[in-house]
Image (cartoon, rainbow, N blue to C red):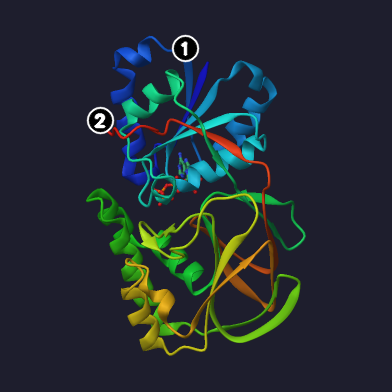
Amino acid sequence: MYFFIINPKAGNGRPKRIFNKLRKSKLYSETESIYCYTRYKGHAEVIAHSIKESYSLVTAVIVIGGDGTLHEVINGLRNHDITVSFIPGGSGNDFARGISNRAKPLKIVNNIVNGEKDLPYWLGNYKIDNKKSRFFINSMGFGFDAEVAQAANASIHKKLTTLFRFGTISYLIALIQVLLKYKPMEVTLEVNGEVRRVPNCWMVTVANHPFYGGGMKIIPSARNQPTVFPVLLIHSISKWKVLTLFMTVFTGKHVNFKEVEIIETTKLGVFSKNKVHYQVDGQTDTCNKCVITKESQSIRIAGKTTKKDTSA
Ligand SMILES: Nc1ncnc2c1ncn2[C@@H]1O[C@H](COP(=O)(O)OP(=O)(O)OP(=O)(O)O)[C@@H](O)[C@H]1O
């Protein structure tokens, strides 16, 4: 049995339209499945957690929503044995980009039902302050990018730009708004066992794949694998240079700036006396301490076309 979780609020209602179309298909009518719409923020996590009880009956959980919805489902399941699939319907959809899944919704379901090979995917693990550890699917960032994500989520432009499929534009508007008032943080990092103080720090970002903010290549070299992960560190830079730097993020050329460092590590600690903003898979909050590691056991992602074919 396939279990669909649909976020009707993601991507200006796109997941609902996708699912309505899917339900009218012959493939759907021939497939044993149940579905559930999310009703509030965090509901996808509650639904996924409840599936855990009867997971032996579920062949795969199919998420239709944005990256935030997938983040909740993965954390609700907390079980690497349940196969998960993702039909992108959000405003950013960086996860689908990260695994290079450009297939259309019907094709994704067709791939799952017809047993296309599952893709192994290694999540990031993060522990904020003294809370329970959780997983992230795409990236986690501290400082400037987190404040930009927060401003973009709250912006009235987001709805409009998502409607016209220009999610990145709302991110760029938020970037300029935050840039004008941003004050760099003072953080202590623990990387590869070494402690390092970074007084004029703009951002620290960790990623499981290159994409971020609706298609920017924040860490172009990031590859999904089980051991190390890359950390992008931007510090001691002027505001105007940050603007120039972000102009080149789409091509990945920003890594050539002398103020940008990329460090590979198995564990990252971020500590600060003052609360710092963080974003995890696009959702934001503040913290004083975070420890990030890589999950060595992979989860299984179904529905990706392994042969070169992206037709519906
Ligand atoms: N019924 C609902 N009403 C309000 N919010 C909801 C509902 N269902 C889920 N949510 C919340 O919607 C938020 C946004 O979801 P999601 O991130 O999947 O979409 P998005 O922001 O459009 O896409 P992306 O993350 O790819 O940019 C999540 O925080 C989720 O908890």
Amino acid tagged 1: Glu
Residue 90: horizontal and vertical position, in percent?
Answer: 37, 45
Residue 290 shows in this picture: yes
Q: Can you tell which quarter of the image residue 304 is in?
A: top left
Q: List the residue tagged with mark 2.
A: 311
Q: Is residue 25 above or below residue 247?
A: above
Q: Residue at x 67, y 48 (%)?
A: 295
Q: Does the numbered disc 2 mark a residue whose Cβ is under 8 Å from ligand 1? A: no
Left or right, residue 18 beside residue 232: left
Q: Whole-Å distance between the Cαs marked 2 and 1?
A: 23 Å
Q: Which mark is residue 58?
A: none
Residue 113 percent across, percent down from the top left: 43, 19
* Residue at x 34% of width, y 19% of height: 23
Tag 1 residue: 32
**Vertical order, 291 against 304 (above or below):** below
Q: Is residue 191 left or right of residue 29?
A: right
Q: Quadrant of residue 179?
A: bottom left
Give the residue drawn at x 33%, y 27%: 107
Q: Nearer the viewer, residue 301 or 153?
A: 301
Measured as percent of width and height from the top left, residue 119 is found at 51, 36
Percent across and percent down for residue 65 are 42, 39
Position above or below: 128 against 192: above
